[in-house]
Amino acid sequence: MNMLDEVKGIIAKQVEVPLDQLTAETRLADIGIESLDVIEIVFALEEKFDISIPFNANESAAEAFETIGAVADAVQKLVDAKAA
Amino acid sequence: MNRVVVTGVGVVSPVGNTRDEFWSALVDGRSGIGPFENIPTDRLVCKIAAEVRNFDPKDHLESKQLGLMDRFAVFAVLAARNAVKDSGITFDEETALDTATIIGTGVGGQNTIDDSYLRLYGQNSSKVHPFTVPRLMPNAAASHVTMDLKLRGPTFSIVSACSSGTHAIGTAFHMVRSGQAPVALAGGSEACITVGGVKTWEALRVLATEACRPFSKGRNGLVLGEGAAMLVLETRDSAIARGAPIYCEITGFGMTADAADITSPDAFGAGRAIKAALRDARIDPGSIDYVNAHGTGTTINDKTETQVLKDVFGEHARKLAISSNKAVLGHSLGAAGALEAVATAMTLKEQIAPPTANYLEPDPECDLDVVPNTARKMPIRAAISNSFAFGGLNAVLAFAKH
């Protein structure tokens, strides 16, 4: 499974949105994801890939988490960095 | 109804354990936040906190007494002793039977919880210390204060996260005002800085990385603190009769629930709490000169609190001097409201608004007068102190100069 599908799976489960409605361009805010949901999604991704995502709810690092595709890219980079 | 005044204060804090050390750090904007000294940091992402440093409980308490106490109870007992000493009050048998002791805490015996879980799950021990229960229970601080000072009136703890200390003082204020208790010891205590405690806050992703900067552009979260503060509340008549020093009068208390989000603040609920406090004090909003803000340094609290003050005070909001003590004290959860009540009492006594320290530059979303970085000598007739807790529980005290 590629990273985009992994992320879509986790997000779909978190907010109970059908998987087939999610694309790389889907904006988290548009599917009703609130600040606490983001924190849970970040945690689920950290657990799944055994990585640490430097996410502070007070900072606009949230920009990196605007779309599902952006989340997948950020996670992929951390996974690659860990393997390197 | 009785008029209620503050006649004594006591603190254990990251900037000192005497009233004068505490107040001078607030006025100078000298922060108690720094790298951890009391706990191992190898597994922490967060690097800073406002710890009570160089503190040895054995300097103050007998080992038999200490063996039964968590750190948060030790803090409360010392703060209570200092408050009583400061007020000069002596408890005759009759008064002691009616004196109330109300203490707020967010989590209770966090050190005890951490230690016992470490033994069980980390060190594979099958036993914990026999006093684990009496040490960790959230009412332990209140109980130890009563035993230490032999106070036998209405006593309990209040648990409302970051509003606990304010709820405790407000409740005690109402008890003295109504005549239910002639005297009350009220405040809050917290000792939440353990590896386990810090980890839980890291997980929420709200901790600042290098400083607490309330209301400033560039703020990025709160910094955990610890400590305790206790106040002696009594009727104005009894204080005057015994020639006691009077810091200020407590005039009102308001409390509300947001019934909205478990972590995000809500302008409507917070505003209603301020209005309730002003109504309880029968005071015109236009005579409030100073606001001791909740001001945690998170993006959302500070912008919401700014909006709340505009909603409640209208045009007068621009004339308020507003400051947060949390850049200096960190956020000590259940003790925060009590430490800030002592700060507000000192503010009224000295007629000096302490600054919001660590301020960098204006944030358009926090555009009121937050007394950035430099204390201000000014006439302060009346003040409020805000606490807006996780769980949407708001508590606000109103004070007046005496």
Image (cartoon, grey):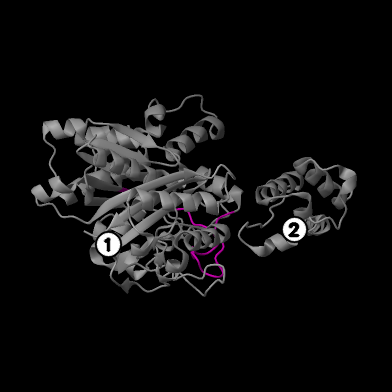
- Quick check: can you spot residue B36? yes
Label 1: few (<14), some (14–19) or many (≥20) C-alpha neighbours in 10 Å: many
Mark 1 residue type: Leu
Q: Which residues are magenta?
A: B206-229
The residue under label 2 is A65
Quadrant position of residue B136: top left
Nearest the eye: A57 or B396: B396
Q: Is the residue B39 above or below the residue B218 in the image? A: above
State the residue at coordinates (89%, 50%).
A2
Please indicate whether residue B86 sits to the left or right of residue A14 in the image. left
The residue under label 1 is B348
Quadrant position of residue B34: bottom left
State the residue at coordinates (53%, 57%).
B301
- Quick check: can you spot residue B15? no
CA gap, disc 1 to disc 2? 46 Å
Nearest the eye: A71 or A47: A71
Percent across and percent down for residue B84 are: 19, 46
Mark 2 residue type: Phe
Queried whether the magenta region covers residue B210, the answer comes back as: yes
Q: Dot 1: what SS?
A: helix
Percent across and percent down for residue B278 are: 37, 53
Nearest the eye: B268 or B205: B268
Percent across and percent down for residue B279 are: 37, 50
